Image (cartoon, helix red, strand yellow):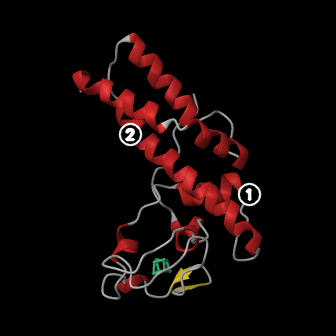
Amino acid sequence: MRSLPELKAECSRCVALCCMALPFDKGEDFALDKPALHPCPNLTDHHCTIHDSLRERGFPGCARYDCLGAGQRVVEEVFGDADWQHDASLRAPMGEAFAILRRVHAGLELLSVAERLSLPEPLSRERAELRALYHPQADWTLAMLRAFAAQDPDKRLQAFLKALRPHV
Ligand code: SF4
């Protein structure tokens, strides 16, 4: 069985996807408005120019954000080390893949906890099926991620997690 991917952000292996793909609303968490798929004005050549003072500069939302390792995986696995900063046409597909793979990794984080439980057969089978959905044997492609999103398996995952309560 394929081992679970890293569920921890490695920004040095990413291309600042979160700083481009995500939208911000000016408020307590962000000091400015930013639409989705537009680079943050604080971003220069993959680096946040205010990284050491995010909270002081009005961006605590960035300090708290965690892609759970989806960023580096989109870059390396889905897009073969491509970089939206060299090709603006990649912004939309990389942003789309990032949003879906972040959901995948959030699901895998929950499933990784469930993996440690001893479960009766029906739940054990459902765990295996969900694992296969969230962590297929083949590398993710954008088409696979779209198919995953279309199935909306998060509802199925939530129902599974609810059924675990008597076993925790
Ligand atoms: S403030 Fe820095 S960390 Fe936040 S989105 Fe902009 S460049 Fe990225």
- Labels 1 and 2: the sequence-earlier one: 1
Q: Residue 55 appears in which quarter of the rendering?
A: bottom left
Check the image and report above or below for 88 versus 79: below
Residue 26 visible at all: yes
Q: Residue 41 appears in which quarter of the rendering?
A: bottom right
Q: Position of residue 118 (x, y in %)?
A: 32, 19
Image quadrant in which the N terminus is located: top right
Identified by mark 2, the residue type is: Leu
Q: Position of residue 13 (x, y in %)?
A: 59, 65
Q: Left or right: where does residue 105 sit relative to residue 27?
A: right
Q: Position of residue 18 (x, y in %)?
A: 53, 68
Image mark for residue 113: none
Image quadrant in which the C terminus is located: top left
Element type at mark 2: helix
Q: Which residue is mark 2?
A: 110
What crowding class fits label 2: few (fewer than 14 Cα within 10 Å), some (14-19), or many (20 or more)?
few
Q: Which residue is mark 1?
A: 80
What crowding class fits label 1: few (fewer than 14 Cα within 10 Å), some (14-19), or many (20 or more)?
few
- The answer to whether the beta carbon of the residue marked 2 is less than 8 Å from any atom of ligand 1 is no
Q: Left or right: where does residue 27 sit relative to residue 103?
A: left
